[in-house]
Amino acid sequence: MHMREENMQMGVRTLTTGATEVCYGWLMMLAATVILFGGTAYSQESPSEQPSLGEVSQELTNPVSNVWSMFTEFDLFFSDGNIKNTGGSKVGGRMIFQPVLPIPLYGEGPHQWKLITRPTIPEVFSQPVPKGFNDFTNLGGLGDTQLPLLVSPPTGNWLFGLGPTLLLPTATRTEFGRQQVGAGPAFVAGYKAKDWIAGVFPQYTWRVAGWNRKDKPDASYLSLLYFFAYSLPDAWQIGFNPTINYDAKATSGNRWNVPVGLFVSKTTKVGKMPVKYVLSIEYSVASQYAFGQRAQVKLSVVPVIPSLVKKAIFGGS
């Protein structure tokens, strides 16, 4: 009995240490980005050509802008459901890393076609996982990667992008992934005005290959980001940007998670590099009946980096 408890404690310590090392690794990468690019982000443009911090802030809200950035989000989330009947919500933590890399395809300036690549890579530091009724364990590891590839034409103030989204089985634990390769459609639609921007970014994914076991039903799920941001003086913003999730293969009552929330953001400079900081609070008005996320607090750090692809791949002017 004592041996088993010691082994469990050692496993938890190992898990915690591994998650901490991953967290430190990502933070070091983020710090390296700030140091390496902080003095060169806008050095190739004259001061008159540089957009204001307010304009940069709005472009970082736009899923189909031409700004390269290293989006990093840290989440503290609270889960609950009828599988537990004592104590408060279970608390977990994760990080989402999402490099946003728009690649110019054809044309220049406002007449340019772009390919928007923005892989979403989740790293779970600690997530409560049910083992039975009122029985939980906390696990950590890498989740599956979602990779949308959107072609965005020049549409003026309208936002539009269309293309496939891919599910890549990169999870390091079966609890954090589907062990499947998936694909489906994705698009962005919205509008950008002088002081505000709004839109939706849905992605639907089906299984196309991989394991097909009873405990892992075929992937068939929706992820829908809906967003609105209003620009304030001095590069401040307020708005919302929750993501609705729907799993068609989940049991009744466990298919939807519908959060609502608010965020406040500030864009400033580190050296010459713009960096956007976003603090969000969300609450799910609909969540999984058995066990699902009820609320979360998000802190995002979004440094702008220089574009590594300057000229359109297929030319055009």
Image (tube, rainbow, N blue to C red):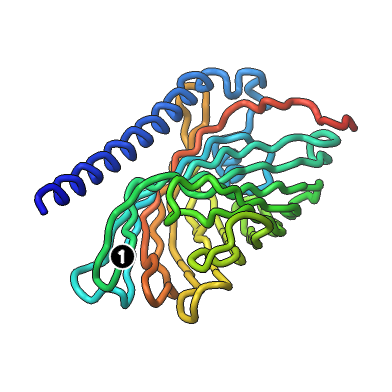
Q: Is residue 135 above or below residue 53?
A: below
Q: Residue furthest right?
A: 316
Q: Residue at x 46, y 67 (%)?
A: 259
Residue 289 in the image, given as x and y percentages of width and height: 39, 77
Q: Is residue 152 above or below residue 285?
A: above
Q: Residue furthest bottom?
A: 252
Q: Amino acid at mark 1?
A: Lys
Residue 309 in the image, given as x and y percentages of width and height: 72, 27
Residue 14 visible to the viewer: yes
Q: Is residue 146 above or below residue 52?
A: below
Q: Residue at x 51, y 58 (%)?
A: 241
According to the picture, the residue beneath numbered tag 1 turns out to be: 131
Q: Residue at x 29, y 54 (%)?
A: 138
Image quadrant holding the C terminus, namely: top right
Q: Is residue 119 above or below residue 223?
A: above
| Badge count | 1
Residue 216 in the image, given as x and y percentages of width and height: 52, 64
* Side (left or right) of 262 relative to 145: left
Q: Which quadrant of the view contains residue 22?
A: top left
* Side (left or right) of 151 relative to 269: right
Residue 217 in the image, given as x and y percentages of width and height: 55, 67
Callout 1 environment at 10 Å: few (<14), some (14 to 19), or many (20+)?
Answer: few
